[in-house]
Amino acid sequence: MAGALRLTALFALVGMLLTLVLPEPAQRSLDDMSPEEVVSQAEEIVRGASSAPVTV
């Protein structure tokens, strides 16, 4: 169990560091966007994900 927790902590740490290192592709933060823009972008992503074929 301790090994799993260490592995999870490692992935969390790597994820945090990557968010600091990798640039935002759109060069915009959520603070720069209006709530309507955030909702419309999220809906667009969901529509694109739901139309993608699922392979098992």
Image: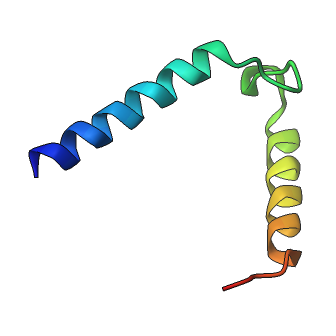
Count all numbered tags in the image, as a single digit: 0
Residue 35 placement: quadrant? top right
Decide which of 40, 55 is in the foreground and name it: 55
Residue at the image position 83 percent from the left and 57 percent from the top? 45
Q: Is residue 7 above or below residue 17?
A: below
Q: Quadrant of the C terminus?
A: bottom right
Q: Is residue 50 above or below residue 25?
A: below
Residue at the image position 16 percent from the left and 44 percent from the top? 3
Residue at the image position 40 percent from the left and 36 percent from the top? 11
Decide which of 32, 49 is in the foreground and name it: 49
Residue at the image position 78 percent from the left and 22 percent from the top? 24
The spot of residue 53 in percent (x, y) is: 83, 81
Q: Single out the residue that lies furthest toward the bottom.
A: 56
Q: Single out the residue that lies furthest toward the top.
A: 21
Q: Is residue 56 above or below residue 15?
A: below
The spot of residue 28 in percent (x, y) is: 84, 21
Q: Indicate left or right for 15 with 13 as reference.
A: right
Q: Indicate left or right for 6 with 22 as reference.
A: left
Q: Indicate left or right for 54 with 10 as reference.
A: right
The spot of residue 15 in percent (x, y) is: 50, 30
Decide which of 29, 39 is in the foreground and name it: 29
The spot of residue 42 in percent (x, y) is: 79, 52
Colour setting: rainbow
